[in-house]
Image (tube, rainbow, N blue to C red):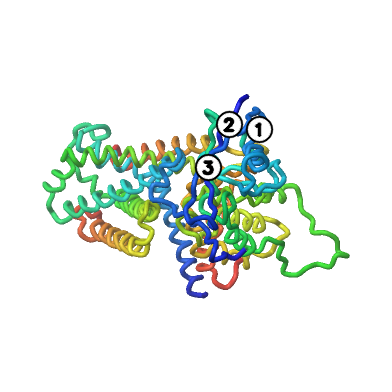
Amino acid sequence: MRETRKVARLHAILWGIFSLGGMIAAFLLPVMIYLTGIAYPLGLWPFNGSRDPSFLVTGTLLGMLFVFVTVAGSLFHGIFRFQSALTEVGLLRLKRGLEAVGYLIIFVGIVLLAYYLLVLNPSLPAL
Amino acid sequence: MTENKSFPELRRKLNPGWWTANRHYVQYMVREWTSLFVALFSLVYIYGLSLWVTGSRSAFLNLLKNPATIAFSFIALVFTLYHAVTWFYLLGQVVPIKIGKTTSKPWQALVANLILMLIVSYLVIWLLVLR
Amino acid sequence: MDTATIRVTRYRPEKGPEPFFQEYKVPYRNDMVVLDALNYIKANLDGTLTYRWSCRMGVCGSCGASVDGTPKLTCASFLHEFKGRTITIDPLPNFPVVKDLVVNMEDFMEKLVRIKPWIIREKETPPEQGEYKQSAEELERYQQFSSCINCMLCYSACPIYGLNEKFLGPAATALAYRYIEDSRDQGRNVRFPIVHEMEGVWECTLVGECSVVCPKGVDPMLAIQKTKILGATNAIRSILMPRGGR
C-alpha cells in the first residue's frame, strides 16, 4: 500500500511538472519556433536579413535560461502527453513500455540540453 | 447481481477508432496530438544545438536553412498555437475566476491569455534580439 | 398517421450470444420522448423489450441509454430532435450488458461507495450542541457537484473509462470532491488517498465529454481538475513539510 502511495505521489508531482510544461509550451514555445525556425532562416523581423546567429544559441545568461526553460518544459509536456495519446488509440497494452521510453527520452534530452548550454557552449557568457 | 454463467453478459470493447464517433472526440484527438509537434520541435532543436556547440557551424546553418526544416517549423508553429489556444480555453474551464457575482467564461480566459502570450513573445524578442 | 422508427439493439443471452437489431414503428406525437416510444413498444408491439426507467422526468437517473450514439436519458430525449424520425437505441456504452438495454451497474456502485460519500468528522459533536452551520458561500463551493443523479451517462461518454475499467471516473470523483469541498467534512485524509491513487484522477486527460452529456450540469471534468490540483499541491506540501503544515 505504501508503495502505491509513493508512486501516486510521484505521479502527482509529474502531473504538476507536465502542467507547468503546458504553460511554457503555450507562452514561450511559439516565439521560439518563430525566431529559430522561421524568422532567422527567412530573414524576417526581428532579424531583417541580419545573419549573425550567435543569439540563437545564446551568448547571454538570459538567452540560455530562455532556451533551457522553453525546450525542457516543452519536451516534458509533449512527451508526457503524447505517450498518453498513443495509449488511447489502441496501444494501451504497450503503456509501460511507452512510459519507460518516454521518460528516457525526456531525461536524455534535458541532460543533453543542459550539457550543451552550460559546458560545450562556445559563446558561454563569463559567469 | 453477480453474473449468471448460463446467461453471460455482453462485453463490448472500445475500438481504436472510438474517437471518430463525434466532433468533440475528434477535436480532443487533434488537441492531444499537437503534443507530438511540441516534443518533435524540442528534439530537433536539441539536435541543432548539438551541431552548433560541437563546432559544426555550417551543418547547423544548413539545417536551419533547409526548406524541410522551415516547412516543419511552420507546421510545428501552427500546432503549437493550436495547443496554446486550446490550453487557454481549458484554463478558462477549470479555473474560473469569480469577481463579485460574475464568473469568467472560458472564451474570456482564451482572449486574455492570448493577449498575454503576445505580450510575452514581444518581450522575449525585445530582451534577446532587439536590445 | 405519423410514425417514428425505433431501432433497438437487443441482447437475449438465453437465445444466443450475439446482439441483434430490431425495428419498431411507433405512432408519433411531437411531445413524445424516447421513453414514451419504448413504453409503447413494450405495451403494444413486443413485451419482451427490457429497459430501466422510473420517474420519467429526469431526476432518478434510471433510464440512461445511447440514443443515436450519444448517452442520454430516454425520458429527456424528444423524438422531434431526431432527423427523419429514425432513432437507434443502444445500451449505455462501457458497461457490460445484462439483457437488451439493461447494463450491469456494479462497478459504478462500488466506486460511489469507495469514496465514502458521507460527512466524515474527526469528532462528532453531540446533537444538543446543535447542527453544523454552513454559510451560503460555503454551500456554493460544492452545491453544483451534489446535483448528480447517478445516471452513469458520464461513464458512457468517457473513453478513458472505456479503455480502462479501473479508472475511478467522473461521477465518483465529482462526488468525492463534493465532500472534500463541504465545510462540514473533515475527511480529506481519508478521501485523498482514494482519489489520488494511480487509477484515480491521474488517468483523466480532459476529454471533457462527461460534462457535455451530464443532464444536471454537475461538470465532473471541473471536479476532477480541481482534485488533480489538490493532489499536486498536497504532494508538494508533503515533501516540503513532511511532518505537518496542514
Cα–Cα span, label 2 and label 3 = 14 Å
Q: Which mark is residue C32?
A: 1
From this view, report whether residue C196 is shown above or below residue A46. Answer: below
Question: Which quadrant: the C terminus of chain B?
Answer: top left
Residue C201 in view (yes/no): yes
Tags 2 and 1 touching, CB below 8 Å: yes
Tags 1 and 3 touching, CB below 8 Å: no
Crowding around mark 3 (Cα neighbors within 10 Å: few <14, some 14 to 19, many 20+) is few
The residue that disc 3 covers is C22
Question: Which quadrant: the N terminus of chain B?
Answer: bottom right
Instruction: Look at 47% across and 53% down and name the residue there.
Output: C18
The residue that disc 2 covers is C4
Earlier residue among tags 2 and 3? 2
- Disc 1: which chain? C
**Position in image of residue A53 (x %, y %):** 19, 43
**Position in image of residue B53 (x %, y %):** 18, 54
